[in-house]
Amino acid sequence: MINNAQGELRLAVVEGSPLTQLPEDLYIPPDALEVVLDAFEGPLDLLLYLIRRQNLDIIRIDVAEITRQYMGYIALLEAMRFDLAAEYLVMAAMLTEIKSRALLPKPLNTEDHEAEDPRAELIRRLLEYEKVKLTAEVLDAMPRVDRDFQIAVAKQPDSDERTIPPQVDLSELVLAFSELLERARLSSAHQITWEALSTRQRMSEVLTKLKEQSELTLSELFSVEEGRAGVVVSFLAILELVREGLCALVQAAPGSQIYIRPVSENV
Amino acid sequence: MSDFDLKRILEGALFSNLAPMSIYQMKKLFGNQKVPTEGMLREALTSLADDYKARSIHLVEVAGGFRFQVSQDLIPYLANLTDDKPGKYSRATLETLAMIAYRQPVTRGEIEAVRGVAVNTQIIRTLEERGWITVVGHKEVPGRPALLATTTEFLNDFGLKSLEELPNAEDLIVAPTEDLLDQMNVHGE
Amino acid sequence: MSDFDLKRILEGALFSNLAPMSIYQMKKLFGNQKVPTEGMLREALTSLADDYKARSIHLVEVAGGFRFQVSQDLIPYLANLTDDKPGKYSRATLETLAMIAYRQPVTRGEIEAVRGVAVNTQIIRTLEERGWITVVGHKEVPGRPALLATTTEFLNDFGLKSLEELPNAEDLIVAPTEDLLDQMNVHGE
C-alpha cells in the first residue's frame, strides 16, 4: 500500500535505512548557506544530517567533532539569518555543555543514577525527531485523493427539489474580501509604515481584557454602538496583535466560534 | 493501445469530472502518446454507453460533450438525503469566491498568493457546481493556468445587474487605514 | 423492493455523492418506505463492488463510509487534462501532520518540542483548511493549549478506514537503532 514513488529523494542509505535528502559530502559555500538551510527543518535536522553524513550510529556520535562542525555552521548562520539562529544556538549551547561534561573527569562518589550519560537526552531527541521525519515521508508516499486517485462522481439528476444550496448574503462576500485584503496587507509585513492611534489603543484594550479573562470570543470585542468603524478598528487591532505574536486566534472548525487567547509561556 | 484500454481510460476520466467532456478534451488525455482518432473515441463511447444501459447511471451526450448522469427515477430517493435547512459555505469557500468576484479573471495561483494557503480543488468544484464561477480562458504563462471568473448566474443570485454594482470592499476599511490601502493597491497591481 | 432495486438505488446515490456514504445515510435514502437492514445493504454493496471489479472505477470503504474511486493507474492520463498540479506539502507541514496523526491529541507545544523548531501558524491553518486536522479540546495546563487531532476527512483522503491502518511508526526505525532505544530507556528514565 505504500507507494515508494518518492524513494528517489532518499539519497543516502545508512545501515540499511534511507536517511538524508542531501548528497553525502555536500560542501556548503558560505553564500549558499541561506539556501541550504531551507533544506533543514531546524537544529535537530541539521545535527541528524551531520551525524548521518559520517555514517554513524547515533549512539556512537563523536560529540566533540559534531560540535565543532555544528558550531561552524552556526557561526555562518548567525551572520546571515539571525532570526533563525535562536533555536540553533540553544542546540549549540547544549552540545557545548555535553562536550565539556565529557571532558571533565567523572566524580567518583556519585551514585549510579546521577552519573547518567549527558548525551542521553540529546540522543533521545534525535531518535524521536528522526522517527517523525521518516513518518512524514511515509505519510507523503501514501496514495491520497486528488494526487493519486480521484473520487468517481456522476452528475445528479436535474430536479428542483433536490438540494437547497447554501445561501450567501452579498455583505458576507464583501466582508470576506475586505478581510482578505487586510490579511494580505498584514502578511506583507515590511510595507507597514505606521499604525493609527485608535488601532494601537484598541490593541491595548484587547490585551487588558485578555489579562482578566484568559479567553475571549471574537464577538465580545465588537460592540454594536461603535458601528462599522468600531468593528474595523477591533479587527485591525486583533490582526495586529496576532501579527506581533501577542495573541492567537483559535477556531475549532470552519464557521465556528473564533477565540482569542494570549500567547503564553506554555508553548 | 487496445480498445479495452481506451474504454477504461475514457470511463475513468468521465467519472473524475463533473463537467461534460468534449472529444477535444478526451484527446488531451493521451498527452504525448498516440492520440486516438475521433472515430475510435466515438466507438469506445458507444460501447461504454452500452455497458451502462442496465445500470442506474448513464452516459449521455450534452452540449459540452459527454458525461455520466444518475438516472432521473432515483430523484425521490436522493431527495431523502438532503437536509431541509441549507448548509453554510466555509470561510475558505467564501474568500475564494470573493477573490474571483473582485479580481476576475484570476488564476488559482493568484488566489493562493493572496490567501496564503492552497485552494482546495473541492472549493473550486463546489463553486463551479453552484454555477457561480467558470473557466473563461487560460493565462499565457507557463502551465497555462485556468482563468476563473463569475457567471451571470452569480450576478442573478446576488441581485446584481453587473459587476460594477459589487460594493467597494475598500470602503469597509475606514479613515486611518485608507492611505495604507492606497499603498496596497499600488503594490497589488 | 427487490435486490435489484436496492443495488440500483445505492449505485445512483454513491455516484451522486462526493463524500463517502455511511450505512446510516444509505438507510436515509428510503425515507418513509421500508428501510433495508444493514445486512441487506452490505450484501448489495458487495454485489455492486463485484459488478465493478473489471472496470476502471472501484467501490471502496473508507472511514466515512463507501465511495466509488477512479483507479490509481489512470492518474497519468487524468493529469494531462489539467494544468493544476495537486498541492505539494512542505516537509514542515508533513512533519506536523505526521506528529498529529501519530501522537494525537497533541498540542502545538508538544510538536515543537519534538521538532526542535516553532510550528508556523500558517502550517496549522493549511492543515485545518484542508480539513485534515481539528481542535478536539484543550489541555488542562496553563494557557489551555488546543489539542490537535486528525479528522475523518483525513482518513478518507488517505483511503484509510481507521487510524490503526496507518503504517506502524516503530517499524520505520530499523534494527541497529532499536537496541539503542532500549539502552536509551535505561538512561532516560
Image (tube, coloured by chain):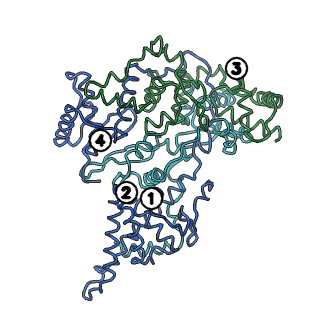
Chain colours: A blue, B green, C cyan
SS for callout 1: helix
Check disc 2 and give the amino acid type.
Arg
Q: Which residue is mark 4?
A: A242
Labels 2 and 1: the sequence-earlier one: 1
Looking at the rendered structure, the kind of residue marked 4 is Val
Query: What residue sits 67% from the left and 38% below the top?
Result: C78
Few, some or many C-alpha atoms within 10 Å of disc 1 (few <14, some 14-19, many ≥20)? some
Looking at the image, which is closer to me, B77 or B95?
B95
Q: Is residue B21 left or right of residue A84?
A: right
Q: Is residue B7 left or right of residue A179?
A: right
- For image coordinates 55% across by 68% down, the residue present is A24
Residue A131 at x, y percent in the picture: 47, 62
Q: Image check: A52 left or right of B44?
A: left
Q: Is residue B121 visible?
A: yes
Residue closer to the observer: B152 or A165: B152
- Do the numbered discs 1 and 3 sit on residues whose CB atoms are within 8 Å? no
N-term mark: 4 or 1? 1
Counting from the top left corner in percent of width and height, residue C60 is at: 62, 42
Element marked by disc 3: strand
**Camera-nearest label, 1 or 3:** 1
